[in-house]
């Protein structure tokens, strides 16, 4: 048995649409004037078993072997609606009564065959399960080992019109407009009305056949689109990214790097990267080089928020060579990139020949495409996997019917908001794979909004996949094959109200440099950001080793604390109240780390008090625990806690308030194990401003609690 399956899903050469009762009736046709694109095992070919050619509008097949084989166009249709497959076949030679040909229909693991036998004027209908090599026949045996008699079958050199129709719970096979087989789909034909994943011409035993055409007519739902969304979107080719196999663009959450792959050497895919020169333009891409590019197929799956760590497809040996499939991470250093380290995962094996992954911006969640036996809804489905405290990504959980279909899902990308998911689907499309979007509804990652097609301004009548979007929501990048070759295109996205429903929620990108407060030298440090209401760490980043640059991406609904820490320095912190975010925003904020020396004065930015009160609010816990960690690690250190106010109010009132706030901090530390002898509390009121003026910004800087290192 020769089984040929296409690796990608695409449409046939011609497509015709009509609307029936609010649904779309589509007919797709291969006319065999030349080789249909994207079919498997359909190129002109000759060996001792088979010859294929295209002559005078026919697919000509001289099948010399005694087995069964077929060619295949792999796609996905919703088989719960009526459909039919037709072809015209002429047999010019048949070696025996069972030789012939017809139609094969793939439904998941089952291949259904509908064959005519011209010498015996008979038919045979059966199915084969690829995994277990199980055969089932649905027709009766006829004379001389032939099939079930069917007088409507015409002889050698004559045209036979074959049609297989699945509708209203029945499978019907007609030859030259005469029903030769009919059976309820409930009788071992159930998958014919559940999922349809491929069709093709079928050849059996030694025979010479000509196929005139092959059509599939099916009914599907109207595409789930937002009418007029993205109307006026502009698509342009990224010529600077062009090259053999240029594909799979991945933009970093901070919008500063765009990674993609291409195959310049002609052997394996290599990773290229371009640095942003604005929010919509890029410097010329460069090879990322060793140790990330090696002898294997290379690909960037996801980029950290700061752009300083990448998740890679594949594992690496100690000498940098490929160690096969899996995942690895590499971090940026002053000298380039580290040798990638393996990331553990417990993912089920996939029976699909391709798979893709992406990470959430905080790298705690992986979205993956897999065809998992017993769990998939059709072809490849989208699954979620969570990272545990050891850094291992756990078992896969199916994202469910609002996202997955009977077809293949591919190329997932989670936007910078961590909730808007884009991917390519082969179901409900304008042609081949289309880009879809869904939004996560809760923190289980299993509840999603109903999927939406991005519409005809984004999707084409060909293949569209590998969509990624800038954090500002204004620009996207996609692979398409609608006349732009198989390259990467940029899409300028409209920002009207309808289009916004399909775009990510706005985020705030905080970026800057981490510097030594005394020398102003850049520092490579670990950066964390937390929910101040719960003191829960949400994510981490690192500053770039060469220049100290960092970035984090923050979503709405929380007040965040962002802090950087390094041995020998007190962790510096800033807070960002982001209960609502009206629009994409970039905030520049340099972080200055104060060296731990006698006399150093360090501001505690994330201490919070109610207006005109001295009681510490719970959002202060994270900052105070970092101060406890410092005092615990240096048991001889003594500090002076110093409160300050702005210029409003009387001197006496401000002195009392600032002293009371300093004493509240001292009492909290004592309640958590710090000896009173190591602490003093002072209030300076409005007498020691750090910034002159009466603006809100100046007053905010002057309202503070510092601590001064008195003794080490």
Image (cartoon, grey):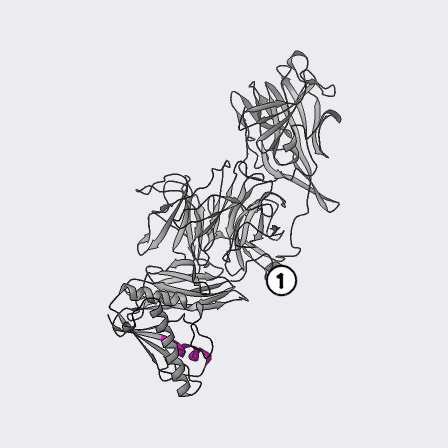
Number of residue marks:
1
Q: Indicate the quadrant containing the N terminus: top left, top right, bottom left or bottom right.
A: top right
Which residue is pictured at 33% across the width and 53% down the height? 336
Reply yes or no: does residue 193 show up in magenta: no
Tell me the crowding category of disc 1: few under 14, some 14 to 19, or many 20 or more residues within 10 angstroms, Cα based: few
**Quarter assignment of residue 100:** top right
Where is residue 209 shown, x and y percent of the image? 63, 23
Where is residue 405 shown, x and y percent of the image? 60, 43
Which residue is pictured at 70% across the width and 37% down the height? 82
Query: Which residue, given by chain and number where applicable, does mark 1 sit on?
Result: 497
Pick whichever, 544 or 690, lies toward us: 690
Range of magenta residues: 685-705
Above or below, 557 relative to 298: below
In the image, 271: left or right of 173?
A: left
- Is any atom of residue 692 visible in this view? no
Pick whichever, 652 or 538, lies toward us: 652
- Is any atom of residue 249 visible in this view? yes
Above or below, 443 relative to 147: below
Above or below, 557 relative to 447: below
């Amino acid at each position: 048995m020769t089984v040929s399956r296409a690796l990608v899903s695409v449409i046939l050469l011609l497509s015709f649409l009509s609307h029936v009762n609010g649904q779309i009736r589509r007919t797709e046709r291969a006319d065999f004037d030349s080789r249909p694109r994207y079919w498997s095992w359909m190129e002109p070919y000759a060996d001792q078993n088979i010859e294929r050619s295209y002559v005078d509008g026919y697919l000509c097949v001289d099948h010399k072997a005694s087995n069964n084989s077929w060619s295949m166009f792999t796609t996905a249709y919703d088989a719960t609606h009526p459909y039919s497959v037709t072809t015209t076949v002429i047999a010019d030679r048949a070696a025996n009564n069972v030789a012939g040909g017809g139609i094969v229909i793939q439904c998941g693991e089952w291949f259904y065959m509908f064959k005519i036998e011209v010498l015996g004027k008979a038919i045979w209908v059966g199915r084969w399960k690829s995994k277990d090599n199980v055969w089932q026949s649905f027709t009766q045996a006829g004379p001389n080992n032939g099939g079930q008699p069917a007088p409507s079958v015409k002889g050698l050199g004559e045209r036979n019109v074959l049609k297989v129709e699945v509708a209203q719970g029945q499978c019907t096979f007609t030859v030259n407009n005469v029903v030769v087989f009919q059976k309820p789909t409930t009788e071992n034909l159930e998958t014919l009305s559940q999922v349809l994943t491929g069709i093709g011409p079928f050849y059996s035993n030694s025979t010479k056949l000509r196929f005139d055409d092959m059509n599939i007519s099916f009914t599907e739902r109207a595409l789930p689109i937002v009418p007029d969304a993205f109307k006026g979107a502009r698509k342009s080719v990224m010529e600077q990214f062009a090259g053999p196999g240029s594909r799979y663009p991945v933009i970093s959450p901070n919008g500063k790097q765009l990674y993609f792959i291409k195959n310049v050497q002609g052997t394996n895919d290599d990773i290229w990267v371009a640095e942003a020169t604005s929010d919509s333009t890029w410097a010329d891409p460069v090879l990322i080089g060793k140790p990330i590019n090696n002898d294997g197929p290379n690909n960037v799956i996801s980029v950290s928020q700061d752009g300083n760590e990448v998740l890679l497809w594949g594992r690496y040996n100690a000498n940098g060579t490929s160690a096969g499939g899996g995942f690895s991470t590499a971090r940026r250093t002053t000298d380039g990139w580290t040798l990638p380290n393996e990331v553990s995962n417990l993912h089920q094996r996939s029976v699909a020949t391709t798979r893709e992954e992406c990470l959430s911006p905080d790298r705690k969640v992986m979205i993956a495409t897999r065809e998992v036996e017993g769990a998939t809804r059709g072809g490849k489905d989208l699954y979620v996997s969570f990272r545990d405290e050891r850094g291992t990504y756990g078992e896969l959980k199916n994202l469910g019917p609002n996202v997955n279909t009977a077809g293949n899902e591919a190329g997932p990308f989670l936007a910078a908001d961590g909730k808007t998911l884009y991917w390519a689907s082969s179901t409900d499309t304008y042609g081949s794979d289309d880009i879809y979007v869904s939004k996560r509804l809760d923190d289980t990652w299993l509840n999603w909004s109903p999927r939406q097609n991005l519409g005809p301004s984004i999707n084409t009548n060909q293949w569209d996949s590998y969509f990624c979007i800038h954090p500002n929501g204004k620009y996207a990048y996609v692979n398409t094959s609608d006349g732009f070759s198989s390259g990467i295109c940029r899409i300028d996205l409209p920002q009207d109200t309808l289009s916004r429903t399909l775009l990510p929620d706005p985020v705030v990108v905080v970026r800057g440099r981490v510097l030594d407060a005394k020398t102003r030298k850049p520092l490579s440090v670990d950066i964390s950001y937390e929910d101040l209401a719960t003191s829960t760490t949400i994510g981490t980043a690192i500053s770039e080793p060469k220049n100290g640059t960092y970035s984090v991406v923050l979503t709405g609904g929380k007040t965040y604390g962002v802090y950087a820490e390094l041995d020998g320095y007190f962790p510096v912190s800033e807070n960002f109240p982001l209960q609502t975010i009206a629009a994409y925003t970039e905030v520049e904020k340099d972080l200055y780390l104060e060296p731990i020396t006698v006399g150093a004065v360090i501001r505690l930015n994330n201490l919070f008090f109610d207006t005109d009160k001295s009681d510490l609010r719970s959002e202060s816990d994270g900052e105070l625990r970092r101060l406890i960690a410092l005092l615990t690690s240096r048991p001889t250190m003594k500090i002076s806690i110093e409160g300050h106010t702005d210029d409003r109010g009387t001197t006496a009132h401000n002195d009392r308030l600032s002293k009371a706030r300093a004493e509240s901090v001292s009492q909290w530390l004592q309640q958590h194990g710090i000896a009173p002898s190591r602490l003093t509390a002072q209030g300076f009121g409005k007498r020691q401003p750090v910034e002159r003026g009466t603006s809100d910004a100046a007053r905010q800087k002057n309202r503070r609690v510092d601590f001064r290192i008195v003794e080490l």
